[in-house]
Image: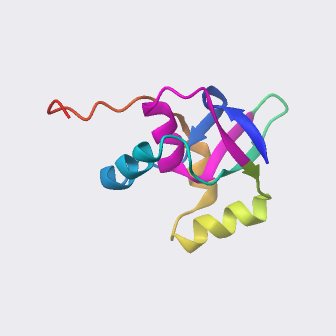
Amino acid sequence: MAYMPINRLRKIHPIRSEDKLREYMNMKGAWPPVSIHTYRGLPEVEIVAVVDGIHRTQAAVQLNLAGVDCVEVSESEARAEALERGLNFDDLIHRATPFEKIDFGGGR
């Protein structure tokens, strides 16, 4: 297990469940490590993608945590995770974006 600063991580899909995000926020960082895959494309391209743990990582962002515990998975594991969810890994990795704080609005 390793520790990764939030600013190095990229999300490969948007947050789909605000309830799940709030559940992790209530845990205040006491959650299992997230799974990441470091994709190396061209010589100067490196994308550290969260392949399992998008909601946990977003909760860390919302709580102003500097980073998260993580486990590096192989490309074949990352591809299998995407396939299991009916997603295309190559498309996801090329659309990966930085994590940013979410404004829930409504004064919550």
Q: Nearer the viewer, residue 41 or 102?
A: 102
Q: Nearer the viewer, residue 77 or 88?
A: 77
Q: In the rendering, at what x and y percent does residue 64 appear?
A: 49, 26
Q: Nearer the viewer, residue 23 or 72?
A: 23
Q: In the rendering, at what x and y percent does residue 96 appear?
A: 56, 41
Q: Residue at x 80, y 58 (%)?
A: 74
* Rendered view: 2 above or below 53: above
Q: Nearer the viewer, residue 15 or 22?
A: 22
Q: Residue at x 79, y 48 (%)?
A: 1
**Magenta highlight range:** 46-70
* Rendered view: 68 above or below 79: above
Q: Quadrant of residue 44?
A: top right
Colour scheme shown: rainbow
| In the displayed structure image, the side of residue 107 where residue 104 appears, left or right | right
| In the displayed structure image, the side of residue 108 where residue 26 appears, left or right | right
Q: Is residue 60 magenta?
A: yes
Q: In the rendering, at what x and y percent does residue 84 appear?
A: 57, 73
Q: In the rendering, at what x and y percent does residue 8 appear?
A: 66, 30
Q: Residue at x 14, y 33 (%)?
A: 106
Query: Looking at the image, how many numbered discs can be counted on the residues?
Result: 0
Q: Quadrant of residue 81?
A: bottom right
Return the residue found at the far left.
106
The C terminus: image quadrant: top left
**Residue 64 makes an appearance in the image:** yes
**Residue 14 makes an appearance in the image:** no
